[in-house]
């Protein structure tokens, strides 16, 4: 078996090389197109970076499924960086493992990347570090970096990985339950109350089998353990086994009270939001504590929608901006990042009518007038106030917990 | 009676998507069990058309250009390849090979050919996308046009040549009119194939070739169903227009 | 043209081959190399780990069987519907409006169809609302489960909606090309009944000549992605969803398993295509 496979592989590789050679000839290979060294880029001073970046274009890859976020980028950020630096910001759709594969393939071919700037966090950051696709450390270079709240563990650590200047904080959010107050008078105030609540209100609750749902499972597992602090640091197999086992037991015991008797779960968050908007379920979830305001403002959710954080808390995390190791326009990307963490851009973004993404700046470093602007933003109407949930914030555990929960949720719950 | 009822029923079934999408696009706060929306608004239409700073119009242009190029290249190329195939001694083998691209499910195809497109220095460019789309569209057109090159057609051609036509004249005056109904189908179908493509275009261009489909596809199937409906209609309307313009040809019975 | 024909066969076919054979084979090779740990991000060198682990991956077999069921049911229903229309509604099909209407599904990409059916058929969807308003059902739960159901009814319906109109057009074209109407007159004068003509003559001719297209629809349905993602359940999964889950999800270490699944699925589809080519040859001209 082994011999046969390696022989076949060898044969395939020969053929592959042949095809590649022919294809490359056809494509008119341009081998002068080599990526620049990262160290060269970062050795420059800020005025040098500014001079080099001016007038270039920046290709930014991000998730593009939210019209408000897109509007913030295209009608505010894009014209602003054009005005300030004459930088032409081009935004394209992409995220997650697909993005990692693209960047890894570009590196394997030793070519400059088609992407300059990335919106990332958590496992994508982890994977991009694994394949060495990020430029850095660069955050120190940014003139606005001293405004960042880098003492805050929810900002300086991304899924238990120290950020270390390899990605720049952009926004900070916390996981919330969203419910329809016209249908549910008293939602469960804690994870401990959840099973009894499900029993009393069957068919109203489900767990999306994707990123947001996994954040829910992580928070629930940490709640069950009675001591969320246990989940700090590197992945702990014994700890995971013990408390994930408990989690599956609780979920399976109450499965029949879930939506569709727990025989199935939504594969994506968007359809769950649609079911919630249509009135089929009474609960949905968000990784952004202000999303409920944003969605009610867009009239997607009913005005009776409310968000809250059940005790003993839910996961709070930050999302970041990364620069590609072999970016064609790293200087211009640095200029854009510096603008995105400026007080003006952060303030604009934090308004629930614009996006509702919490700032990553340390407000005490700002001049009083500017600080007041942040404090006096049009307040959230349907989401809990930030100060009220800060003591209910749990840090993200190691990415491995999510990977394992995702696998085991399938084998232990969905396929049972 | 039956002959009236059936088209009516079928018409309803096939037109229903447009009705429901239209309602969803304008509906506000439309929840179970309301049969019709309690209120209508143009919010979603405006936010989609307004949010993209006229990039949408440019995207429409890019889509038309890309899909048009794919349609012309695939159909023209398909006609030529089909002819070469008909004359080849290994005709059957070539025909079988034409099915090869369809052995890779679309989800897989883009991921697997991307490393090669990158090595060809075509990643992020329109040419790379064109190559990827032709990979799917060219064999499609070839297979569709393969049956045109019958021995009978070859006889017509040689007859035309004996009567004094140059090969170019024979092609323009004899072969092209004969092939036209099929060519029109091939053009239409390969155009649609490129028009609706999201995966290949977005992956191979690393999001840089922002066709209309690439721009609005992210909204279809996102949380906001009003917006999803507007995006869907935006995708459907241009080809619907094409279908309408093309209707005399579609309605004519095959000879 | 004759002078340039040698040019065609010399350069056109090899270039064509490079594109339609070279690129997919290169992709397949990449998938194989990825499954053996020699290509792809984080490739750690040659390993048979993922091939050995294949026996434990019951999910792939489940996905194959489930996809086969969906594709068989969808193409079966679509073909039956198309046949019924062509044999039963010749009059209507020969007139304009219906022909034009049958082209409408061409305009709908799979994702749009999936979104539409989700909004139409889910328990809080439009049909459920209409049935509640007309007193047929009295609650959300009273409406039958038509999407995200165990049997995949929603996925099948979506594919039927996409396939049957085109199959109808195809069968109608074959009906007219094969001059089946003249055959019908003939069999009727010879004393056969209309039913006998449809069963013994028309149906076999139509299905026989449409066989390659039916198989092609079957293959296309097997590889469907957007529709099962929105209208299906996380378990069982259809093939493309199964592969994409492994290629696009959180864990890079699952990539080789994804490449392996993709490679095997492509081999399976290749075998089906081999069958298709044989069918084609039998029915050629």
Image (tube, rainbow, N blue to C red):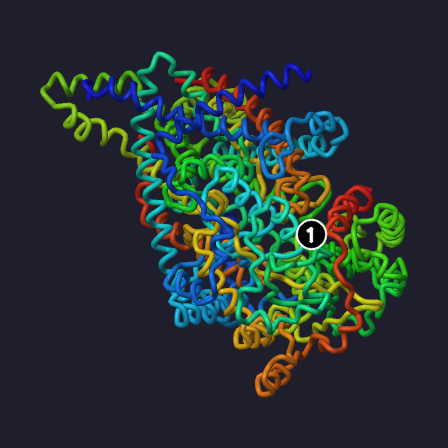
| Residue B126 in view here | yes
| Residue B17 in view here | no
The location of residue C213, given as percent across then percent down, is 49, 28
Q: In which quarter of the image is the C terminus of chain B?
A: top left
- Give the crowd class for mark 1: few <14, some 14-19, many >=20 residues within 10 Å: some
The location of residue C100, given as percent across then percent down, is 40, 45
The location of residue A355, given as percent across then percent down, is 58, 71
The location of residue A283, given as percent across then percent down, is 74, 64
Q: Residue at x 63, y 53 (%)?
A: A125
Q: In this view, does A199 lie to the left or right of A206?
A: right
Q: Residue furthest top?
A: B89
Q: Which residue is drawn at 40% across and 39% down?
A: B121
Chain designation of label 1: A
- Closest to the observer, C64 or B175: C64
Residue C15, relative to residue A160: is it above or below? above
Q: Kindly identify which residue carries mark 1.
A: A210
Res B54 → quadrant = bottom left
Q: In this view, does A329 lie to the left or right of B180?
A: right
Q: Is residue A340 left or right of residue B143?
A: right
Residue A186, relative to residue C230: is it above or below? below
- Closest to the observer, A361 or A331: A331
Res A297 → quadrant = bottom right
Q: Residue at x 56, y 60 (%)?
A: A138
Q: Is residue C186 left or right of residue A93?
A: left
Residue A317, relative to residue C61: is it above or below? below
Res A131 → quadrant = top right
- Closest to the observer, A120 or C276: A120
Residue A256, relative to residue A393: is it above or below? above
- Closest to the observer, C230 or A286: A286
């Amino acid at each position: 078996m082994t011999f046969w496979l390696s022989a076949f592989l060898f044969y395939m590789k020969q053929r592959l090389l042949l095809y590649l050679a022919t294809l490359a000839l056809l494509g008119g290979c341009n081998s002068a197109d080599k990526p620049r060294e990262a160290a060269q880029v970062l050795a420059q001073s800020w005025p040098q970076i500014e001079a080099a970046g001016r007038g270039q274009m920046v290709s930014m890859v991000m998730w593009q499924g939210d019209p408000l976020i897109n509007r913030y980028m295209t009608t505010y950020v894009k014209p602003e960086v054009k005005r300030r630096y004459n930088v032409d910001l081009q935004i394209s759709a992409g995220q997650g493992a697909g993005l990692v594969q693209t960047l890894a393939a570009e590196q394997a071919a030793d070519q400059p990347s088609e992407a300059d700037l990335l919106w990332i966090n958590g496992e994508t950051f982890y994977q991009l570090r694994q394949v060495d696709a990020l430029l850095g450390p660069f955050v120190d270079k940014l003139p606005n970096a001293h405004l960042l709240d880098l003492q805050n563990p929810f900002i300086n650590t991304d899924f238990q990985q120290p950020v270390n200047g390899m990605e720049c904080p952009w926004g900070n959010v916390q996981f919330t339950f969203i419910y329809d107050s016209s249908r549910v008078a008293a939602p469960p105030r804690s994870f401990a109350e959840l099973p009894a609540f499900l029993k009393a209100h069957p068919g109203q609750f489900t767990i999306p089998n994707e990123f947001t749902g996994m954040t829910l499972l992580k928070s629930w597992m940490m709640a069950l353990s009675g001591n969320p602090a246990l989940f700090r640091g590197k992945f702990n197999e014994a700890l995971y086994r013990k408390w994930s086992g408990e989690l599956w037991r609780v979920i399976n015991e109450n499965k029949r009270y879930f939506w569709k008797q727990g025989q199935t779960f939504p594969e994506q968050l968007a359809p769950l939001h649609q079911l919630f908007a249509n009135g089929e379920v009474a609960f949905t979830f968000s990784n952004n504590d202000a999303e409920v305001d944003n969605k009610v403002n867009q009239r997607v959710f009913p005005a009776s929608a409310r968000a809250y954080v059940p005790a003993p808390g839910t996961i709070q995390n930050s999302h970041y901006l990364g620069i590609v190791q072999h970016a064609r326009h790293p200087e211009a990307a640095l200029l854009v990042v510096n603008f995105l963490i400026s007080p003006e851009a952060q303030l604009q973004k934090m308004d629930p009518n614009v996006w509702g993404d919490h700032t990553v700046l340390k407000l005490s470093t700002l001049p009083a007038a500017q600080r007041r602007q942040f404090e006096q933003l049009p307040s959230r109407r349907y989401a809990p106030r930030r100060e009220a949930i800060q003591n209910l914030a749990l840090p993200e555990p190691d990415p491995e917990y999510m990977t394992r929960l995702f696998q085991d949720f399938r084998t232990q719950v969905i396929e049972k | 009676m039956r002959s009236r009822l059936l088209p009516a029923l079928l018409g309803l079934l096939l037109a229903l998507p447009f009705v429901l999408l239209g309602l969803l696009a304008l509906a506000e706060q439309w929840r179970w069990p309301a049969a019709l929306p309690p209120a209508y608004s143009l919010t979603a239409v405006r936010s989609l058309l307004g949010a993209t700073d006229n990039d949408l119009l440019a995207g429409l242009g890019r889509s038309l250009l890309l899909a048009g190029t794919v349609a012309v290249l695939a159909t023209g190329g398909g006609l030529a390849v089909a002819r070469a195939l008909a004359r080849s001694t290994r005709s059957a083998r070539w025909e079988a090979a034409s099915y090869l691209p369809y052995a890779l499910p679309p989800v897989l195809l883009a991921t697997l050919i991307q490393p090669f497109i990158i090595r060809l220095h075509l990643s992020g460019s329109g040419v790379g996308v064109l190559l990827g789309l032709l990979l799917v569209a060219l064999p499609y057109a070839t297979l569709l046009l393969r049956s045109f090159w019958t021995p009978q057609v070859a006889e017509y051609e040689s007859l035309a040549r004996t009567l004094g036509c140059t090969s170019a004249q024979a092609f323009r005056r004899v072969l092209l009119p004969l092939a036209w109904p099929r060519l029109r189908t091939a053009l239409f179908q390969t155009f649609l194939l490129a028009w609706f493509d999201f995966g290949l275009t977005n992956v191979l261009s690393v999001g840089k070739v922002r066709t209309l489909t690439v721009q609005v596809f992210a909204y279809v199937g996102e949380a906001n169903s009003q917006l999803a409906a507007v995006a869907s209609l935006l995708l459907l309307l241009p080809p619907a227009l094409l279908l309408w313009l093309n209707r005399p040809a579609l309605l004519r019975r095959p000879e | 043209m004759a002078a340039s024909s040698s040019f065609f066969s010399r350069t056109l076919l090899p270039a064509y081959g490079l594109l339609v054979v070279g690129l997919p084979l290169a992709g397949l090779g990449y998938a194989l190399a990825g499954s053996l740990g020699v290509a792809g991000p984080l490739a750690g060198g040659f390993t048979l780990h993922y091939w050995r682990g294949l026996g434990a991956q019951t999910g792939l077999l489940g996905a194959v069987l489930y996809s086969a069921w969906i594709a068989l049911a969808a193409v079966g229903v679509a073909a039956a519907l198309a046949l019924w229309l062509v044999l039963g509604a010749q009059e209507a099909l020969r007139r304009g409006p219906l022909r034009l209407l049958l082209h409408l599904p061409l305009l709908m990409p799979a994702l749009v169809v999936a979104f539409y059916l989700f909004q139409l058929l889910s328990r809080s969807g439009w049909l459920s609302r209409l049935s509640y308003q007309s007193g047929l059902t009295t609650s959300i739960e009273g409406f039958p489960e038509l999407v995200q159901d165990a049997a995949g009814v929603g996925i099948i319906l979506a594919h039927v909606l996409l396939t049957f109109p085109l199959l109808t057009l195809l069968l109608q074209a074959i009906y007219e090309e094969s001059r089946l109407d003249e055959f019908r007159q003939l069999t009727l004068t010879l004393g056969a009944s209309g039913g006998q003509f449809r069963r013994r003559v028309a149906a076999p001719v139509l299905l026989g000549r449409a066989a390659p297209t039916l198989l092609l629809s079957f293959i296309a349905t097997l590889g469907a992605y957007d529709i099962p993602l929105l209208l299906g359940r996380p378990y069982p999964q259809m093939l493309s969803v199964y592969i994409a889950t492994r290629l696009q999800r959180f864990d890079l270490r699952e990539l080789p398993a994804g490449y392996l699944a993709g490679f095997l699925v492509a081999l399976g589809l290749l075998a089906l295509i081999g069958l298709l080519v044989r069918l084609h040859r039998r029915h050629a001209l």
